[in-house]
Amino acid sequence: MAGCPRWAAVLALLVLPALPRRAAAGCASRGLCCPGRDPACLSTGWRPDGSHGPCYCDQACARTLDCCHDYAEACPVIPCVVSQWSSWSGCAEPCKTTYRVRRRHVIQEPRNGGEACPPLEERAGCVEYWTRQGTECKQSLIPALITTGGFGKARKKRAAADGSERAGYCVEFQLVAITPGCWHSHHSYTHWMQYLREGHTVCVECQHPALDSRSLHCYGDGSGSKKNQLLHWQAVGNPRCKGTWKRIRQLDTCSCPSVHSFLFI
């Protein structure tokens, strides 16, 4: 371009065709979003370090730093979403210590490393004192639900405050069998269970509101049972703590000692 003015050379450079630029590609253009580490979940595009070449659209790429530039937008983290709990079901079986159930269902499955779904079923202890035919369960079939006698003090205060206090009674039992689960719970509210021992005589108080207004008995007190008949009991707060005992006698005037004193629930 000898002899041409300088401005003409500059103009010639400006009108040269532009070099083709490499396409961005990435995850979205190929519709890729893969769980875990998947070598086949491969695209070509810009990487986080600014280089261009093979890049990934799998969940593990965030740790290995080889994601395609648009991975976060194309594959957003979506946590699990569940419904509200259903109402509690009835007891699984009448006339025995069993369980009730409530459930929920998945509305949105987790994606791209989102938080996993929580449990979809929950169970709680349950006792139903009436059969499916509407008749009252036999006393000898109903396990007694018991807790520490210390709980009775607060219960009596509430009953006196609302005028619903009725005269109760106590029943003495001899402990025959105790499951090891009574001694393996370390929660503060189950501490009393560790002192249960086979052969010991225990005193269990029946008071409002456990005292049934129609029968004037607490469920599971063993009334009507035969002499030396084995009856069942279950500790409240620890489903693994249960056992058998024999009814000794009923005391119409309660004077349970502070040790080995319990309460019907």
Image (cartoon, rainbow, N blue to C red):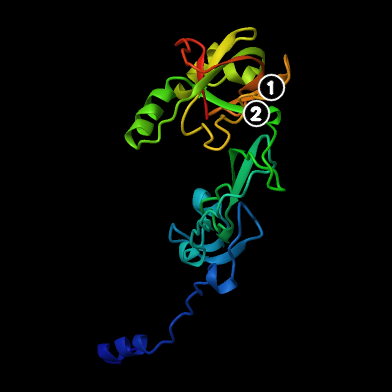
Q: Amino acid at mark 1?
A: Leu
Badge 1 marks a residue whose secondary structure is strand
Q: Is residue 166 left or right of residue 2?
A: right
**Among numbered discs 1 and 2, the one appearing first in the sequence:** 2
| Front one among 8 and 20 | 20
- Answer whether labels 1 and 2 touch (C-beta < 8 Å): yes
The image shows residue 50 at horizontal and vertical percentages of 43, 61
Residue located beneath label 2 in the image: 143
The answer to whether 95 appears left or right of 61 in the picture is right
SS at badge 2:
loop
Q: Residue furthest top?
A: 199
Q: In this orientation, does residue 120 appear?
A: no
Identified by mark 2, the residue type is: Pro
Q: Is residue 248 left or right of residue 157?
A: right
Between residues 120 and 31, which one lies in front from this camera angle? 120
Which residue is depicted at the point 49% across and 58% down?
Answer: 77
